[in-house]
Image (cartoon, rainbow, N blue to C red):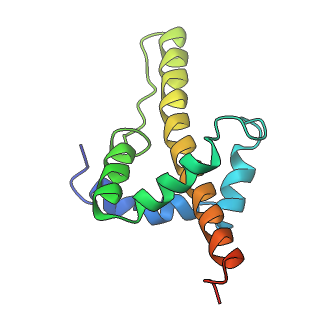
């Protein structure tokens, strides 16, 4: 659920999530996640990444990815448990949920790069 002032999507639009709050676009986001991800880990095959990027460009695909972000990374952060162990478990659970969203966003960005490379190689980017 969103708060009374700013709906979750308005506060965190997919385009801004893709650009990364770090300010350096995906390069900045990749730097933030580098300690948590090994090179290539959690990355789908190139054809899947390109499909995800192409799907993201359709209205239905956009709606699907928006919904995926709504139920994952856009959810409010609640990390207060009755005990230290409960708080740690909630934090680990949230990290896993965010990891899913981050992997999806990373795959879309990778697919976009591959699609742009394909256009350039085929001469369509000129």
User: Is residue 67 depicted above or below 27 in this figure?
Assistant: above
Describe residue 79's horizontal placement relative to residue 62 as left or right.
right
Residue 63, position as x, y percentages in the image: 29, 55
User: Is residue 50 depicted above or below 83 in this figure?
Assistant: below
Q: Quadrant of the C terminus?
A: bottom right
Describe residue 26's horizontal placement relative to residue 12 as left or right.
right
Residue 5, position as x, y percentages in the image: 25, 59
Q: Residue furthest front?
A: 122
- Residue drawn at the location 40% of the way across and 38% of the way down: 72
Q: Residue furthest bottom?
A: 126
Q: Tell how many labels.
A: 0
Residue 37, position as x, y percentages in the image: 72, 36
Query: Image quadrant of residue 22?
Result: bottom right
- Residue drawn at the location 40% of the way across and 65% of the way down: 57
Query: Image quadrant of residue 36?
Result: top right
- Residue drawn at the location 23% of the way across and 43% of the way down: 1
Describe residue 77's horizontal placement relative to residue 33 as left or right.
left
Describe residue 27's horizontal placement relative to residue 52 as left or right.
right
Residue 88 or residue 54, whichever sits in front: 54
């Amino acid at each position: 659920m969103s708060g009374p002032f700013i709906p979750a999507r308005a506060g965190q639009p997919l385009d801004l999530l893709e650009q990364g709050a770090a300010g350096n676009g995906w390069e900045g986001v990749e730097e933030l996640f580098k300690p948590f991800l090994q090179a290539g880990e959690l990355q789908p095959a190139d054809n899947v990444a390109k499909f995800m990027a192409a799907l993201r460009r359709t209205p239905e695909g956009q709606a699907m990815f928006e919904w995926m972000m709504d139920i994952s990374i856009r959810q409010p952060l609640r990390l207060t448990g009755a005990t230290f162990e409960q708080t740690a478990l909630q934090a680990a659970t949230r990290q896993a949920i965010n990891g899913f969203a981050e992997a999806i966003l990373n795959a879309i960005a990778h697919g976009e790069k591959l699609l742009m490379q394909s256009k350039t190689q085929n001469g369509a980017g000129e």
